[in-house]
Image (spheres, rainbow, N blue to C red):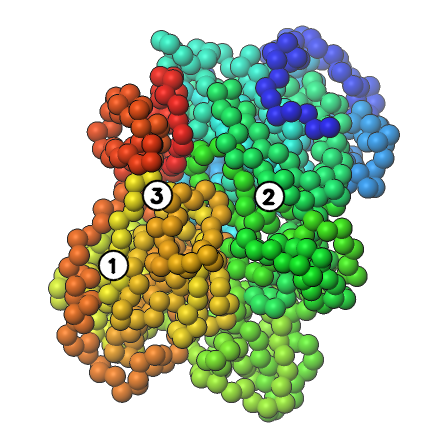
Amino acid sequence: MVPPKRLASAAAIVVLAATTPLLYGPSAGAAPRVPACSTDPNARLASVPSPESFLGFPLGTGQERVVTNDEVRGYLDAVDTASNRVVTGSMGTSVLGQPLPYAIVSNERNVRQGVLKDIAEDVRSLRDPRLVTQKLAGRIAEATPAIVWVTANVHGGEKSGTDAALKTLYELAAGLSCEVAQRNDNLVTIVVPTQNPDGRDASRRQNEYGFDMNRDWFARTQQETDGKVELMRQYPPQVFVDAHEMGGRQYFFPPNADPIHHEISGEVVDWVNRIGEANKAGFGFNGACGGAVTTECYFNYSTYDMFFMGYGDTVPATGFGAAGMTFEKGSSSAVADRVQQQFHTQWATLGWAAANKRKVLTGYYKIWKDALAEGRAGTLEPNEVVQPTNTVQFPVPDITVRSYFLLPDRQLADARRLVERLRRMDVEVYEVSKALKLPTARVFGGRAATDLTVPEGAYWIPMNQPQKHWIQAILGEDPYTPFPYFYDVSSWSNPLLMGLHTVWTGADVRPNARLVDKIENTGGGKTSAAPALRGSYSYELDSAAAAEFTFTLLGQGVQLVRDLDTGAVGLPAAGLTPERNKLAKQLGVTLTPYTTPAAGSPISRPDVGLFRGTGISTTSGSHGEARYVLGKRWGLDLTPVTTADINDNTPAFTGRTVLLVPDGSSATGGLTAAGQANLRNWIAQGHTYLGLRNEGTRMARAAGLTSSTEKPKPSGYTVIGSHLRVDVDGDSPVALGRPAEDFEFNNNDPILDPSTTGTNVLSYPTGDTFWSNGYTVQGAALKGTVALVDEPTGAGRAVLFAFNPLFRAYNESGLHLVANALLYPAGGRAERAAPRRAGAVDPARAAAAAVPVAENLGGEWRPFTIEVAAGDLARAEAVVDRFTDTARPSVAGGSAYLVIPNPEGLQVDEHPFLGDLVRTLRDARIPLRSVVG
């Protein structure tokens, strides 16, 4: 039975003393330790350079500045050279080419190459109880050190965790005390001082592409994330520390705020809470916050949840079975205090893990054993809450889930990429070799089916395997939030993000199927050879993976054509080199041979201008996502286009075939009337305007490019990164390759009325087929509105997305739609003989441009919304007014809503006062019905 997700009593915590002997003996094969450990906590090896001797200043107490990236790397090298307890390596490189170093520290026996390899293999073996008996697991738990990760600086401007990690490394590498010996004998500690060196140099939260890498964990789009997760697969953690900074002068460590994802095991939550008790004992400074104590103190149960599967605590917890923890130190404190407090929590965490390593490893084995049993029975973990004042508002439904199937009838290359994503998290995926019938099934999108045939070639993901928790967390149609508190999204179902045809069933089925070992063996590449002279190959351009293949071929000068009825792309057989066929295999794109030349409309490589004018942030959000997706992955040249370039009609603007306008804060992009006319005339010449979300659609409307208007959002309307069904109009080339019904990701996006002058490519259904998941309140306001519009002007068009199709580069269905817009066929829906100048603005578009612009309360993210009972509005307002005078109150359906504008699009964990505001409301005993940031 899985232990309850509760806070352990303080009496149950093992308190470490400096003279505590080894609890479970030395590691396997170890000789007696000589000399004996010292009772002097300050005893250290003189041969290992201290931070002060190497850097010229101490770390923690007495520190006056933070450490640079060069100093981080230099100090790791120096300690590695001087200490036989340390080995170092690199997880890869950053976007700008900086190494991502790590250090492994333990006793000198454990870090020997052969012994360290054996330790890693033993710990990995605990993750598969099908191969390891209970008895063998007990021996491993007795003799093998646990693995603890100490990481920091995933947000580049949050620097103190890095410096503390270096201090932790020094103490473990040089210390002679029994405290140090216990940690080194019972643990292998992996220290990653900085996960984001480019952001650290720039004092910027995001990496060089503007990505928040503490949202990138499941998708692993960024190279910094990918290298780290691969190293975690090699050295799977039982405890994982992710050190951050926040606003103010306080410190957060778990117990966490609700919600906690239901598939995080009870053992993990129990360990996290027990480590919290150890951190309380070891924190020092002013102790717990409360009353008159408001600075250099700690708090728990607030702000930082464990729900979204993109965090540095949830992915270690769910995917690796570790006590994943976010530690947050207020950035307004002095450097010395920030670093010293980070060190105290890191050191206390290591102390708890060392004292309890046998129990942790025993429990670690049990996590995977329980997961197997749950998967075999098709049982989902229940929703629970950890905050003492909360109750479960939304239980996990009573359903049985034994298998998922990815059907091969559409978006096959993206389905294969998902298979590879799962496989790289140690999920076992099988390819069905003989069709089977499911007596009952559920089709993604909320529909039921009976006697559903799963064809040959489908991918089967059985839940009866150790990674059951991760499978459900990543594939599940709904995350089943227990409690409506969010500071990120409420849906990340990978099949929905990709728009895959997916079903799940509670039936106990055992298909004829083969285990997939790597994506290259899933059927991508040419199925057989086409004649070299007149033959051709064809592939379906219906996926983000196929789009990447297409742009790569175009960049290499391959002549491509596209069937404008089916969306398939053809290329001459002579254009398929072994290297290009290998790429098709890696991307999962199947190439079908033909004996005749390829037929269709030619497609060409777009020349893209990326708008960086008024209202656009170039360091975060969709501008960076465009640089990454279009620039790095698709290999397109992106020319910066400014407001002045459009107003003055410069070659930087007029020489482009596509203008992409990311999301931003301006309704006009700063364009003058002349600039708007220049934009219309440029489009009329056969070019494409591609506008994203707020600024992208509003700038187009202001320029007279669309008749679609923006509807006000009703009071209480809440769409927290949810998926919704959309109807697809296949008349537009933007929809080529998409199914008649698709799914779209909505994150409090603008609500657009249908266009009367263009094609409404994606529309929310008006009838019973309307469907949403995640946390969506008053979603009916979207019925009959549109998410994507294709508006012709002359020989060109404006393609307007109400949502951000590039969101975090993991919204694959959106990426495919962007690719279709970039590859819009010459002439498109307009005749080639269309006027080369736009002429007068259509009256419906002129009327739309005259409509007052809705206020952008959320920037590129969302405004902050606090819901209380209508009767508590006055009390809540009194508290909120102490922090801001910008809140917008409203009442609907017995609830009161306080909407706090967030024009900079800040996340909750980087906001200067929202966390304090929520804690103050709780302290005032005002019941919070929901909090959305």
Tag of residue 473: 2
Instruction: Give amino acid for label 3.
Output: Tyr
* Mark 1 or mark 3, earlier in chain: 1
Determine whether, in the image, residue 603 is placed left or right of residue 598: left
Picture coordinates of residue 862 (x, y %)? 34, 42
Which of the pair 315/258 is nearer the observer? Answer: 258
Which of the pair 12/879 is nearer the observer? Answer: 879
**Total marks placed:** 3
Residue depicted at 31% across the width and 23% down the height? 872
Picture coordinates of residue 767 (x, y %)? 42, 58
Instruction: Give amino acid for label 1.
Output: Thr
Picture coordinates of residue 194 (x, y %)? 51, 37
Picture coordinates of residue 407 (x, y %)? 64, 63
Residue depicted at 57% across the width and 29% down the height? 384
Determine whether, in the image, residue 385 is placed left or right of residue 921: right
Tag of residue 329: none
What is the quadrant of residue 100 in the picture?
top right
- Residue hosting label 1: 709
Identify the element where label 2 is drawn: helix
Q: Where 206 falls versus 182 (above or below)?
A: below
* Mark 3 or mark 2, earlier in chain: 2
